[in-house]
Amino acid sequence: MGFMDDARKNLAEAAENTADAIQDGVDRVKDKAEEMSAEADVKKAEAERDAIKARNDVKEEARD
């Protein structure tokens, strides 16, 4: 029975290590997705800022 107990213990440890590795991978993917989303939000905000500045510049020139 010692061999079977050791095999079960090793199998349980391997399953736990596999689950941990999978969870780490999932967490990394989620982190990268959040990072990319934040970068896209920044680029969108910068584009909106530039568009508003350009529009205001045109309005200012028209006033002169």
Image (cartoon, grey):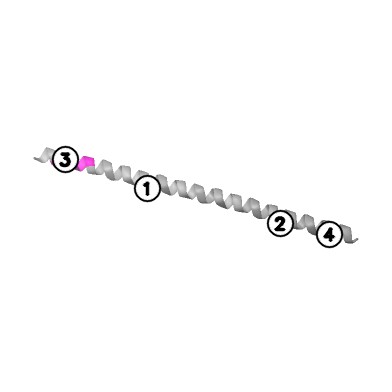
Please check the rendered image and state whether residue 62 is part of the magenta-colored stretch, yes or no: no
Image location of residue 38, percent across then percent down = 42, 49
Residue placed under numbered mark 2 in the picture: 16
According to the picture, the residue beneath numbered tag 4 turns out to be 6
Q: CA distance from mark 1 to mark 2?
A: 39 Å
Q: Residues within 10 Å of mark 3 (few under 14, many from 20)?
A: few
Disc 4 marks a residue whose amino acid type is Asp
Name the residue rendered at 41%, 44% in the picture.
40
Question: Sequence-wise, which precedes: disc 4 or disc 1?
Answer: 4
Q: Is residue 56 left or right of residue 27?
A: left
The residue at the point 12 percent across, 38 percent down is: 62
What amino acid does circle 1 point to?
Answer: Val
Mark 3–mark 1 Cα distance, whole angstroms, equals: 26 Å
The answer to which quarter of the image holds residue 8 is bottom right
Q: Which mark sits nearer the N-terminus, 1 or 2? A: 2
Give the magenta-colored segment's residue range: 54-60
Whichever of callouts 3 and 1 sits on the residue coming sooner in the sequence is 1
Tell me where residue 25 appears, x and y as whole percent.
Answer: 60, 50
